[in-house]
Amino acid sequence: TQSMYRATIDNVPDQPTVEEALAHPGWHASMTDELKNIEARGVWAPVDAPPGTPIIPLKWVFRKKTNGKLKSRLVALGYRQVFGRDFN
């Protein structure tokens, strides 16, 4: 439903915080679609981490395209991993 993401350039924040994105219908729909796509592709599933296991943090990245489409991506901050501690 691309029409949901169309917005005028003036009333949509370029780089919203997660809180701002959740409060905005267009950004919220974009975030929901990203989560649905991740689940549909089987990229990952939420699980309980074993005790003492470091968890890789996630970050939302928001981009407003020049055509007005709002894109949300959930990315893992894998660069924070340390060899020998987080993986071998």
Image (spheres, helix red, strand yellow):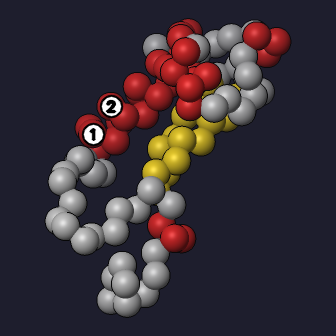
Q: Which mark is residue 39?
A: 1
Instruction: Identify whether 28 is placed above or below 84.
Output: above
Task: Write the residue at 19% across / 67% down.
Answer: 51
Q: Which type of secondary structure does the marked residue at label 2 adopt?
A: helix
Marks 2 and 1: in contact by CB < 8 Å? yes
Task: Write the residue at 63% across / 32% down.
Answer: 17
Task: From the viewer's side, name the closer residue of 13 and 51.
Answer: 51
> Is residue 65 at least partly visible in the picture?
no
Q: Which mark is residue 19?
A: none
The crowding category of the residue bearing disc 1, from other C-alpha atoms within 10 Å (few below 14, some 14 to 19, many at least 20), is: few
The percent coordinates of residue 60 (x first, y second) are 54, 41
Task: From the viewer's side, name the closer residue of 40 and 53.
Answer: 53
In which quadrant will I find the C terminus?
A: bottom left
Residue 72 located left or right of residue 86: right
The percent coordinates of residue 26 (x first, y second) are 56, 15
Q: Which type of secondary structure does the marked residue at label 1 adopt?
A: helix
The kind of residue on which mark 1 rests is Glu
The percent coordinates of residue 10 (x first, y second) are 82, 12
Task: From the viewer's side, name the closer residue of 51 and 8.
Answer: 51
Residue holding disc 2: 36
Task: Write the residue at 34% across / 41% down.
Answer: 38
Distance CA(mark 1)–CA(mark 2): 5 Å
User: Which residue is most to the front?
Assistant: 52
The percent coordinates of residue 55 (x first, y second) are 35, 62
Task: From the viewer's side, name the closer residue of 35 and 81.
Answer: 81
Instruction: Identify whether 50 is placed above or below 25.
Output: below
